[in-house]
């Protein structure tokens, strides 16, 4: 998983000659630097607040944010759940639609040549351009929010899966040809499994992107709903200059995004652990 | 079948779309159970000829037959196995299921094909690694799995395209010995492509020496030494003379090229 960063692998391997370090030790070695850096950052932030004493609505301090968590805990939790639900739906839709579109595109060469460049163009259009359109189609609320998130998260899935479906090893294709494999066998026993690591790479990017998409969607399209997700909370707290609460909502979104990313990565590794480089544990 | 040959090629020409003439008037006839090597430098058309016999390449003109059938026809493929330069294993499958793949594609039942896969894995000495995944195996082991997969259909003909080219010398020699004993046990006909003349002499009964630009057969050499062959054969005079002869043919051709080249320059 994330612990197999090249830097971590090098430092873990260099000074241990005879004995492989235990999992805990390896994990600590990889997690310690980032934890220390985070604590130093928060400490400096609080130190700056204590020295310069700015107004909390200009720069909130870590303690203000902590206080916001304590006081607004219930509503933060509720908003996080709403955002989580929308994210799950958007991510699921992106995964299914993305896989289907990339399969269709790569199955028909002329379609791939014609349409794939257009998806890149489509992806380059800022998502806010679509929001007025989506609002007229779906109205204010959940469907528009999900649509925004799908638009943001579907392209990494399409692009990655399409590459995977197109890069089946030539010798393996010939092997299947030599043993007279029919097109179903070639698809299910060769092309689809070979594309799986690419599909999961796309899903991993889409996991983070779909959280961002939902928050952006809520920010722009969810204003009228009485109960809102984290994006809605951002709008609300910002308009009241409650910067500590704003930071707390942002932190919730970040934690949600990271957890989702890790979860998708973990599920991917379960599928790929025996065979793909990306899922190998560092040694 | 009227012909006593399992493989026959007559007057084969192969021109690639870019205009290169890969094969010019090549003829080859292989008897049942024979071990024939195609040896030569890169660009001599040895792999192209092998791929034509497997039906992986078309012929521009000429004729080739495998067991009396056109290469690539279902009847020809039924009797044949191809071993690629790389192990070409499916990384998401265990060794056992990789080896069973050819039977799986031909619709053999799961129990039957896995039994047979265990059998051929024992044959290549990898019975204990049946559950391992390719990523956990060494290069030599992967190649053994690839050979086991080729053997599982009991092919009459094995076409091998530089299968040991990427292995270290010790592993290569050990696999050469294993290949010869497998060939003795199964009685298969083997057509073996290599750029290594030592390997060609050690393994084959007949060596087809090929030269490039365009790909032609320069000479065909018999190896008059019976199987089983051991490392003593490598130290024998016959072995040395044959290697020397192959080298002579290839160097002679290369020298001719250089002199033509310098004349053109002058």
Image: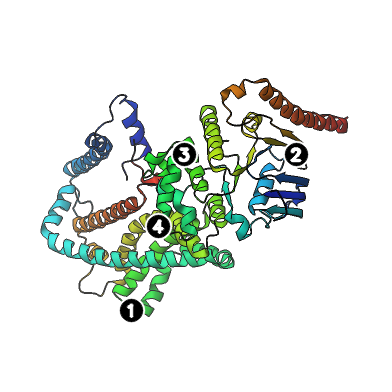
- Residue A202: where, in percent of width, then height? 40, 56
- B170 in relation to A223, above or below: above
Q: Which residue is mark 3?
A: B124
Query: Which quarter of the figure is the N terminus of chain B placed in?
Result: bottom right
Q: Which residue is mark 1?
A: A139
Toward the viewer: B253 or A73?
B253
Q: Which mark is on residue B212? A: 2
Query: Which quarter of the figure is the C terminus of chain B placed in?
Result: top right
- B148 in relation to B41, above or below: below
User: Under tag 4, what secondary structure?
Assistant: helix
**Left or right: A130 as drawn, with respect to A265:** right
In this view, the mark in front (2 or 1): 2
Residue visible at 55% across and 64% down in the picture: A112
Question: Does residue A61 appear anywhere in the picture?
Answer: yes
| Chain letter of the residue carrying label 3 | B
Considering only order in the chain, which callout, 3 or 2, is on the residue closer to the N terminus?
3
Query: Crowding near pointer 4: few (<14 within 10 Å), some, many (20+)?
Result: few
In this view, the mark in front (3 or 1): 3
| Chain letter of the residue carrying label 2 | B
**Left or right: A48 as drawn, with respect to B137:** left
Q: Which mark is on residue B110? A: 4
Q: CA distance from mark 3 to mark 4?
A: 21 Å
Toward the viewer: A55 or A42?
A42
In this view, the mark in front (4 or 2): 4
Q: Dots 3 and 4: beta carbons under 8 Å?
A: no
Residue visible at 41% across and 75% down in the picture: A133
In this view, the mark in front (1 or 4): 4
């Amino acid at each position: 998983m994330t612990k197999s960063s090249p830097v971590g692998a090098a430092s873990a391997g260099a000074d241990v000659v005879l004995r492989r370090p235990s999992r805990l030790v390896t994990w600590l070695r990889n997690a310690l630097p980032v934890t220390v850096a985070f604590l130093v950052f928060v400490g400096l932030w609080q130190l700056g607040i204590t020295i310069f004493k700015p107004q909390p609505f200009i720069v909130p301090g870590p303690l203000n944010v902590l206080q916001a968590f304590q006081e607004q805990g219930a509503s933060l939790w509720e908003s996080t759940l709403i955002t989580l639900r929308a994210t799950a739906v958007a991510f699921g839709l992106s995964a299914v639609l993305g896989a289907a579109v990339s399969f269709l595109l790569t199955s028909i060469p002329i379609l791939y040549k014609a349409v794939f460049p257009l998806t890149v163009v489509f992806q380059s259009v800022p998502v806010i351009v679509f929001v007025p359109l989506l609002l007229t189609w779906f109205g204010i609320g959940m469907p528009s929010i999900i649509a925004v998130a799908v638009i943001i998260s579907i392209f990494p899935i399409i692009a990655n899966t399409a590459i995977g479906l197109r890069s089946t090893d030539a010798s393996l294709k010939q092997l299947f040809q030599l043993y007279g494999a029919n097109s179903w066998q070639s698809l299910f026993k060769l092309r689809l499994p070979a594309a799986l690591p690419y599909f999961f790479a796309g899903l991993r990017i889409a996991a983070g992107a779909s959280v961002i998409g939902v928050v952006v969607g809520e920010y722009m399209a969810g204003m009228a709903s009485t109960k809102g997700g984290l994006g809605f909370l951002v709008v609300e707290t910002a308009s009241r200059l409650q910067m500590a609460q704003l930071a707390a909502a942002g932190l919730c979104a970040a934690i949600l995004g990271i957890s989702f990313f890790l979860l998708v990565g973990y599920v991917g590794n379960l599928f790929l652990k025996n065979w793909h480089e990306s899922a190998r544990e560092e040694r | 079948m009227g012909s006593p040959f399992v493989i026959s090629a007559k007057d084969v020409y192969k021109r690639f779309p870019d205009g290169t003439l890969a094969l010019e008037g090549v003829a080859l006839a292989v008897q049942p159970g024979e071990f024939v090597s195609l040896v030569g430098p890169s660009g001599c058309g040895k792999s192209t000829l092998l791929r034509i016999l497997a039906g992986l390449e078309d012929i521009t003109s000429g004729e080739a037959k495998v067991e009396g059938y056109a290469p690539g026809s279902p009847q020809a493929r039924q009797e044949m196995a191809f071993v690629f330069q790389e192990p070409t294993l499916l990384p998401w499958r265990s060794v056992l299921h990789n080896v069973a793949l050819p039977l799986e594609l031909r619709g053999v039942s799961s129990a039957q094909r896995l039994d047979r896969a265990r059998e051929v894995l024992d044959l290549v000495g990898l019975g204990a690694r049946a559950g391992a995944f390719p990523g956990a195996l060494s290069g030599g082991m992967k190649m053994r799995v690839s050979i086991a997969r080729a053997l599982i259909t009991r092919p009459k003909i094995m076409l091998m395209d530089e299968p040991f080219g990427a292995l270290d010398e010790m592993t290569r020699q050990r696999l050469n010995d294993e290949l010869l004993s497998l060939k003795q046990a199964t009685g298969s006909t083997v057509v073996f492509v290599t750029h290594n003349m030592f390997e060609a002499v050690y393994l084959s009964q007949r060596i087809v020496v090929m030269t490039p630009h365009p790909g032609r057969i320069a000479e065909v050499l018999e190896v008059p030494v019976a199987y089983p062959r051991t490392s003593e054969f490598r130290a024998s005079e016959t072995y040395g003379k044959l290697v020397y002869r192959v080298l002579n043919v290839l160097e002679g051709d290369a020298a001719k090229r250089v002199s033509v080249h310098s004349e053109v320059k002058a």
